[in-house]
Image (cartoon, grey):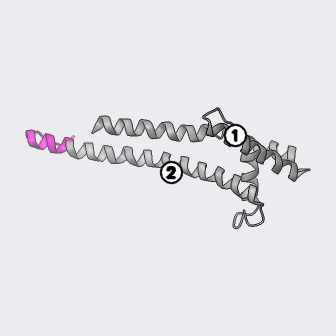
Amino acid sequence: MLVASGIFIYVFTLKSLAAKEKYPPVNCDSVKDYYMPDVNKWIRHAHDSYTKNLAAEKVNNKTDFGGSMQCYCKYIKEKNPKDWLAKSSAEVKTMCKFYFTDIWTSMLIGYSISFLIIAINLILKKVIIKLITWVGEDTLS
């Protein structure tokens, strides 16, 4: 059981790290300052980056979804948190849904790993206490 849980945690950790590395940290303020005079240029560049990286991802090539796409999706969500995609074009909706789905999936996997470790620890604690009780030693440690 311990080996299986270790393998499970290792595999999920790799998946979580891969999802996080897909979007490297970016200073979105400087990206916003660069593109802000021409928002349409920002949208075009973000969508071009999205389509190029999506094609690379499909053939297992290295991707870099950071920069313009990541910052633009964050920008429109911060600008209008309640209905952030309502006035967006179809291409922006697709691009930003892809981005936020990846971010949420990465967070979900990360939290799942944490809860799995806690569950495994609780199970091991119970098993060890049962074994010690079976042997007849004190469990007050």
Location of residue 127 in the rendering, given as x and y in whole percent from the top left corner: 20, 44
Q: Is residue 25 above or below residue 73?
A: above
- Mark 2: amino acid: Leu
Location of residue 60 in the rendering, given as x and y in whole percent from the top left corner: 60, 34
Distance (Cα) linking label 2 and label 1: 23 Å
Seen as rendered, the residue at the extreme right is: 37
Q: Secondary structure at mark 2?
A: helix
The reply, left or right, for residue 55 in relation to residue 112 is right
Please identify the quadrant where the C terminus is shown: top left
Find residue 108 and name its label.
Answer: 2
Find residue 79 and name its label.
Answer: none
Q: Residues within 10 Å of mark 1 (few under 14, many from 20)?
A: some
Rendered residue at 20%/41% (across/down): 128
Rendered residue at 49%/47% (across/down): 109
Rendered residue at 69%/40% (across/down): 53
Range shown magenta: 128-139
Q: Earlier in the sequence, mark 2 or mark 1?
A: 1
